[in-house]
Image (spheres, rainbow, N blue to C red):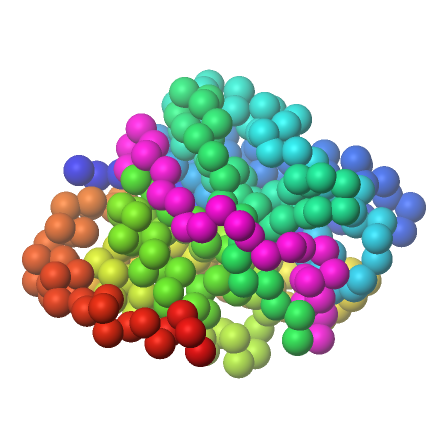
Amino acid sequence: MIVKCGLIQLATAPFDADTSLEDIKEANFVKHETMIRKAGEMGVQIVCLQELFMAPYFAAEQKTKWYGLTENIPGPTTERFALLAKELNMVLILPMFERSLKGIYYNTAAVIDADGTYLGKYRKNHIPHALPGFWEKFYFRPGNLGYPAFETKYAKIGVYICYDRHFPEAARALALNGAEIIFNPSATIAGFREHLWKIEQPAHAIANGVFIAPINRVGEEQPWKTGNFFGTSYFVDPFGKIIVEGTRDQDELVVADLDLDEVTSARDTWQFFRDRRPETYEMLVKL
């Protein structure tokens, strides 16, 4: 079975100190909606947006004003994009800044099925707070929903967000829960991270017999200038081969046809799931 998937990598819409949060959100919504419609014209069936797509990567600083971007999930944004998903007969993955309660916020991805049905959400489990310009613990509580896989019209999919990809247990849990395609919306800057960008995810794809699709935003965001978000979103197949890759520094819709039969083929070849020994891994959750 072939599923046509798309990844949207974009530079944040321009803003300045006087731009309201609502105007920031709306400008980025419009940019993404335009690209989603382009994907629809190409027959794309599943589209994933980049991490915190409604705004710049505000975790470059620690200011409470950005809490104003939070909203409930489901809520206004999922309702808005659900109409678009239904219109285009397209599954949408929406990485957002979720408000669970006042003062309790998560870095979350909502999943909308092709008929506009809200299927559920994934909350980012691993929260970085050590690198200059990545102060996420100021904003996000660690996720508490595990690693759900979502049965969409076209495929069973999973999501983990950015920093989650450094933890192989996350990819394994999603695959064991049935995910055939794992999407990884990210905000990653150039430097040593670029080296890891092309190593970790193909390794996870091989180890778990799944397609993985990392998405990265584009450009150097003002006023922080923490580094260049370098794009190069890509799809990697269950054998670890990068099959389609986006440009390094440009807005782009990255599209690939994924043959889900390759998941079965890879697992029948390697049999990692058959040969794994969970009873010997107890120390992994004790140390």
Q: Indicate whether 202 appears above or below 28.
A: below
Give residue 200's position: percent from left, percent from top. 38, 71
- In this orientation, which residue lies closer to the viewer: 275 or 41? 275
- First to last magenta residue range: 132-155
In the image, is 77 to the left or to the right of 204? right
| Quadrant including the C terminus | bottom left
- In this orientation, which residue lies closer to the viewer: 24 or 37? 24
Q: Indicate whether 19 appears above or below 26.
A: below
In the image, is 18 to the left or to the right of 260? right
* Magenta segment, prevailing SS (helix, strand or loop): loop
Residue 195, picture quadrant: bottom left
- In this orientation, which residue lies closer to the viewer: 1 or 122? 122
Quick one: which residue is furthest to the bottom in this view? 192
Question: Is residue 109 visible to us here?
Answer: yes
Residue 266 included in the magenta stretch of the image: no
Q: Indicate whether 130 appears above or below 63.
A: below
- In this orientation, which residue lies closer to the viewer: 158 or 125? 125
Residue at 44% x, 64% y: name it. Answer: 165
Give residue 121's position: percent from left, percent from top. 50, 39
Residue at 25% x, 61% y: name it. Answer: 208
Question: Is residue 52 visible to us here?
Answer: no
> Number of numbered discs present?
0
Residue 140 included in the magenta stretch of the image: yes
Give residue 16's position: percent from left, percent from top. 85, 51
Quick one: which residue is furthest to the left in this view? 269
| Quadrant including the N terminus | top left
Residue at 49% x, 74% y: name it. Answer: 194
In the image, is 267 to the left or to the right of 208? left
